[in-house]
């Protein structure tokens, strides 16, 4: 890693953390968080512990770049004008989110026309995080990545990038064009943007249930070739058996019921070719970092996450093993769990 790259990373990532942490602190004043139940108050880490853990993630991210595992992020330094626009949108929407949260209203789509509502699975038609419009509007798609970075104090992209190590290992000494990748629940395409930056000739397909989020992904990935984006459900993937050498899935499982997780796991295993690799990124779980377990109990209470409490206690390795996938590694990256699973040849 050259000196200017190290400096660019430190300045860029440091600015991101300060920017998003500042938004988080202001949001706490404008829309105070829920009071922690007495039974978990003593289990919560301090802000100093959280920031120390975040710093450990960033050191790891920088070391990976220095080692050549992946490149310096293409958009580490944001356009200031775009950043300010997103900031204004974030605070303009914060009041509506807070009112929805205090009223525990998470069913804005309950009054939608029946035909429109029936387009989607029942678990999907709700306001996750109490966010406006759930995942079903252009406004939501424009705000989502910013909101997630505020939630994680600027660490969300760095956590996603940890998936690139397993992808790089699988692609080493192969013909890139012959190793197609599917990103399940690709959302706005953040993970795919990092994949394409590092392997421009890798054929990638992103699948998501939200048409507005796919439109945002199409816009953000427009500069890359060999990209296909498909609207569809993860529990019934519209692809033939063994279509992909790589399958990735980030931050989907904690937002679907257990029975849907099983279907999605089976489908991802089905479309993965023998000898292929799956890279899984989601929230860390109970016992992954005991000092932070209290956060796993607080999160579904503070946000609307109806399937989260069950997710953090599920044995994911056993679930994937049922589908014929072998866990090659499992590790924690700040607030995320990174699992690498291989399908025997």
Image (tube, rainbow, N blue to C red):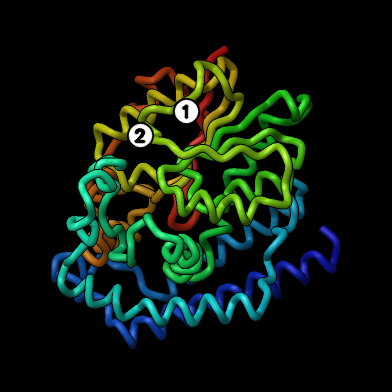
Which residue is disc 2 drawn over? 316
Which mark, residue 327?
A: 1
Which mark, residue 59?
A: none
Q: Does residue 2 appear to the left or right of 269 in the view shown?
A: right
Q: Earlier in the sequence, mark 2 or mark 1?
A: 2
Please tell me which residue is depicted at 39% across the width and 49% down the height of the picture. Answer: 284
Q: How far across and down, in percent of the image, does residue 54 sit?
A: 51, 65
Q: How far across and down, in percent of the image, does residue 28 sit?
A: 34, 82
Q: How far across and down, in percent of the image, does residue 243 sit?
A: 57, 20
Q: Does residue 269 appear to the left or right of 223 in the view shown?
A: left
Mark 2 secondary-structure assignment: helix
Q: How far across and down, in percent of the image, does residue 91 sit?
A: 41, 81
Please tell me which residue is depicted at 28% across the width and 44% down the height of the picture. Answer: 311
- The quarter of the displayed image where residue 276 is located: top right
Please tell me which residue is depicted at 14% across the width and 71% down the height of the picture. Answer: 38
Please tell me which residue is depicted at 56% across the width and 27% down the height of the picture. Answer: 277
Q: As rendered, which of 288 and 89 lies closer to the eye?
A: 89
Q: Is residue 20 above or below residue 252?
A: below
């Amino acid at each position: 890693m050259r000196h200017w790259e190290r400096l660019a990373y430190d300045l860029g990532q440091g600015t991101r953390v300060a920017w998003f942490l500042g938004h988080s602190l202001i949001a706490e004043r404008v829309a105070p968080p829920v009071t922690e139940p007495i039974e978990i108050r003593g289990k919560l880490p301090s802000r100093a512990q959280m920031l120390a853990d975040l710093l450990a993630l960033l050191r790891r991210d920088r070391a990976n770049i220095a080692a050549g595992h992946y490149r310096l992020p293409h958009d580490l330094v944001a356009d200031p004008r775009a950043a300010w626009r997103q900031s204004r949108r974030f605070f303009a929407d914060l009041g509506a989110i807070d009112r929805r949260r205090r009223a525990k209203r998470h069913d804005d789509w309950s009054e939608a026309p029946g035909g429109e509502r029936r387009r989607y699975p029942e678990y999907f038609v709700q306001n996750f995080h109490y966010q406006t419009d759930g995942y079903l509007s252009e406004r939501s798609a424009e705000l989502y990545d910013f909101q997630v970075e505020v939630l994680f104090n600027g660490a969300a992209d760095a956590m996603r990038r940890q998936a690139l190590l397993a992808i790089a290992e699988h692609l080493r000494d192969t013909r890139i064009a012959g190793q197609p990748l599917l990103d399940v629940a690709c959302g706005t395409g953040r993970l795919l943007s990092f994949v394409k930056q590092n392997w421009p000739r890798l054929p990638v397909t992103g699948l998501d249930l939200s048409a507005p989020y796919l439109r945002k992904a199409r816009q953000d990935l427009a500069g890359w070739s060999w990209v296909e984006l498909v609207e569809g459900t993860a529990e019934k993937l519209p692809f033939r058996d063994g279509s992909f050498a790589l399958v990735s899935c980030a931050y989907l499982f904690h937002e679907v019921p257990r029975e849907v997780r099983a279907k999605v796991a089976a489908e991802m295993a089905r479309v993965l070719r023998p000898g292929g690799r799956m890279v899984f990124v989601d929230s860390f779980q109970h016992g992954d970092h005991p000092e932070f377990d209290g956060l796993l109990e607080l999160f579904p209470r503070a946000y609307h996450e109806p399937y989260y409490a069950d997710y953090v206690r599920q044995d994911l390795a056993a679930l994937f093993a049922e589908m014929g996938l072998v866990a090659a590694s499992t590790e924690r990256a700040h607030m995320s769990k990174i699992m690498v699973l291989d399908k025997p040849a």
